[in-house]
Amino acid sequence: MSLVSVIVPTYNRRETIQAAIASVQRQTFEDWELIVVDDGSTDDTAALIEGSDPRLVLIRQKNQGVNAARNTGMLRARGQYIAFLDSDDEWLPHHLELSVAFFRAFPGEDFLSGEFCEDGGSGGLVYFLRSALTEWYPPLAERAGSSLLRLPPGESDPYLRVFASVEPIGEWGGDIVARTPYRDARLYRGRVFEHMRFGFLFALQPTVVTRRAREAVGLFDPRYRIGADYSYLANLCRRFKANFLPLPMAIKHEYARDGTKLNEGHLSTGPTRFEFERDLLHQFEELFGGERGEDPELIALRRARQLVVGRAALGQGNREEALRYFGEARRGQGASPAAALWWLVRITPTAAVAYRIYTGLRRAKVLGWELLTKRAAWGRIARKAWGATATSLRSRRKHVQSAVENRVPLKR
């Protein structure tokens, strides 16, 4: 029986699945089984990999979503440790060796993760958690009136906004790190469930858990076709101490090897963005709602998430859902970004027009900073909205006239 079970859900990923599997095969630790769950692909994803490695187990099922596919893989897993990889991502070669070495050195621990990096094609890597704790989450915490992410006195290490302690990687992992290009050899530890209110602290791809943790936390929530890794990771943090290595362990590539862009279906930018953001909001409410729902900090964070969901709906042309979530976010407030967006959508005839106005104002750094903090006249928004609408209608009228004129000679 293999020591590590690797779970890879896939759906129509023929362009990337072989690279993902190759990254598992390049691991310096080799005692693993690879469980690929093909979630009803309509291309030749499964055919490309079937029989490619005796350690690979291929399971086919009807399309049910990535979380159902992960659950299928987890139920089939036999290893003492369970690791996760998506079929459009890759592991670095040291990932499993370093993870197993950690669990052997700390047999009472159940949850380890590392940095998940994005390669935008320029050669540099963007470190997810470092960026989140440097650029994204601290301003959000400040706006919500939270002190959770404040650095300890005299510290500048962004990871210490979340983790309670840091220590050097000892003999258990020093030699492994020495064989990599990375020298940030430290281990961060702490109870971080409360910090998950700001968003993802970890990604699944560089995460390894023990079978004990898998049995305690259970499976991914099948109600969510996408994004349920947020609640799964939060529940891991609720039950267990988090251990984190600030080394790149997994990479998401923005471009395929032939130069084509891969992120059209990316959850944060692609066609499922509204569903993704909405499901994250619902998971946040389940994790941090209930009796705690009247906490002013959590109310502020919920409003921030509602605003994000509304913007995602607007960007995808869903006017009704945009109004709904902007309306929820503005409730009980005066002038606010949510109120501005709610009125903008109300006074424009289509979501597309409203979105163009919003993106234009945002580029000009007007909406949310200048207009709202200074309580500028709403008439300015209205004039921009109706001006853009009139321009759109004039453009459409000219297009129709041109089409009619071009058809006249054909009728003769």
Image (cartoon, grey):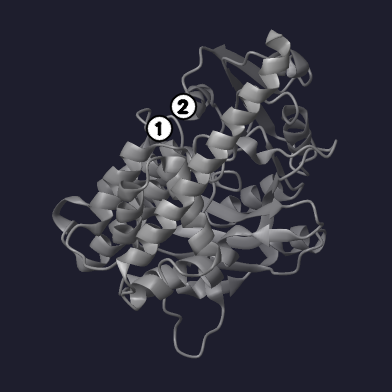
Q: In this rendering, is residue 131 above or below 43?
A: below
SS at mark 1 in the image: loop
Answer left or right for 169 relative to 203.
Answer: right
Sequence order check: which comes first, mark 2 or mark 1?
Answer: 2
Hey, what amino acid is under mark 1?
Leu
* Residue 6 point in image, percent of width and height: 61, 33
Taking the spot 46% from the left edge, 34% from the top edge, the residue there is 226
In the rendered image, which residue does mark 1 sit on? 219
Taking the spot 19% from the left edge, 57% from the top edge, the residue there is 331
- Circles 2 and 1, Cβ within 8 Å, touching? The answer is yes
**Separation of residues labelled 2 and 1 (CA atoms):** 6 Å
Query: Which residue of the protein is positioned furthest toward the front in this rendering?
Result: 412
Taking the spot 51% from the left edge, 24% from the top edge, the residue there is 69
Q: Quadrant of residue 341?
A: bottom left
Check residue 71 in the rendering and tell me which mark sits there, or answer none.
2
* Residue 256 point in image, percent of width and height: 78, 38
Q: Which quadrant does the N terminus fall into?
A: top right
Query: Which residue of the protein is positioned furthest toward the bottom in this rendering?
Result: 154
* Of 81 and 260, the residue lying toward us: 260
Q: In this rendering, is residue 191 above or below 346?
A: below
Hey, what amino acid is under mark 2?
Asn
* Of 58 and 295, the residue lying toward us: 295
